[in-house]
Image (tube, rainbow, N blue to C red):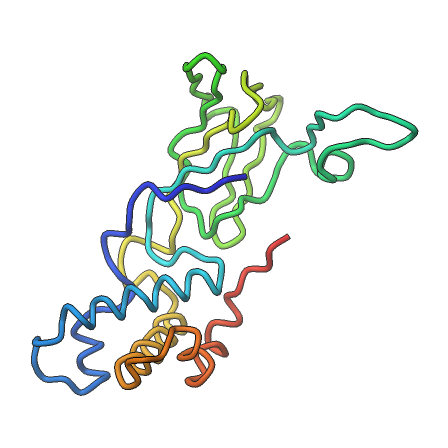
Amino acid sequence: MRIYNLGEPLNEPLLLAEVRDHLRIDNSDEDAYLGALITAARIYAESWTGLHLIDQSLKVTLDQWPGETRGQWWSGLATGPLSGLFGDRTSFRLAVAPVSLISEIRTLDGLGGAILWDSAQYRLVTGVDPVLTLASGASWPKPGQKTAGIEIALTAGFGPNWNSVPAAIRQAMLMIVARLYAARGDSPAEAMRTTGAAALLAPFRRVKL
């Protein structure tokens, strides 16, 4: 599974005004710098939690669907992913979260063409643990190329603007921004370690399987 960012979020989880208030800055002279700190804090929080905070468009590519194996049986053993032996063949957990929408799913034919999969053939369980599952009676469409033959276009994030993001995440970001502003040589990782932001973000951290 590979994930491609198709564009940056249109907004950030923190407003410049609230960052100024938090830092007790009463002018806009450093707005550009504060904006860069907000973006840095968001990127680090997303990396640390495994979540996308503000809605953005992504493309996820797969080589094969869950439960499929491409290896051959030999001496009682099968090659290929473990999901092919023990996984659920009708659904799988998406590697990005939260997910609110799947725009389209396409399979590539290996000759430069693509086939759009009918959205009636699948269902999306939205939220912080998103799952793509087959509709009743449906089956996974077969791609015509072995590598990245399946493309899923989706929207990942808690919502389009700051008030969609959980308050604890926003507070953690404020802590990180304040530390980066006060100690300009620090990294976001150092700010996490020294401010307690990690404790606020810990409940949201997504365990990778």
Find residue 147 and report its horizontal and vertical position in percent: 55, 27
Find residue 128 and report its horizontal and vertical position in percent: 49, 54
Residue at the (26%, 70%) spot, across then down = 37
Find residue 124 and report its horizontal and vertical position in percent: 50, 39
Above/below status of 47 relative to 152: below
Residue situated furthest right in the rendering: 75
Residue situated furthest front in the rendering: 185
Q: Is residue 103 left or right of residue 93?
A: left
Question: Closer to the camera, 67 or 180?
Answer: 180
Residue at the (28%, 49%) spot, across then down = 8
* Picture quarter with the N terminus: top right
Find residue 187 and report its horizontal and vertical position in percent: 38, 75
Question: Closer to the camera, 84 or 77?
Answer: 77
Above/below status of 30 relative to 109: below
Residue situated furthest top in the rendering: 111
Residue at the (54%, 44%) spot, across then down = 94
Residue at the (33%, 56%) spot, across then down = 54
Number of marks in the rendered image: 0
Q: Is residue 45 left or right of residue 202?
A: left
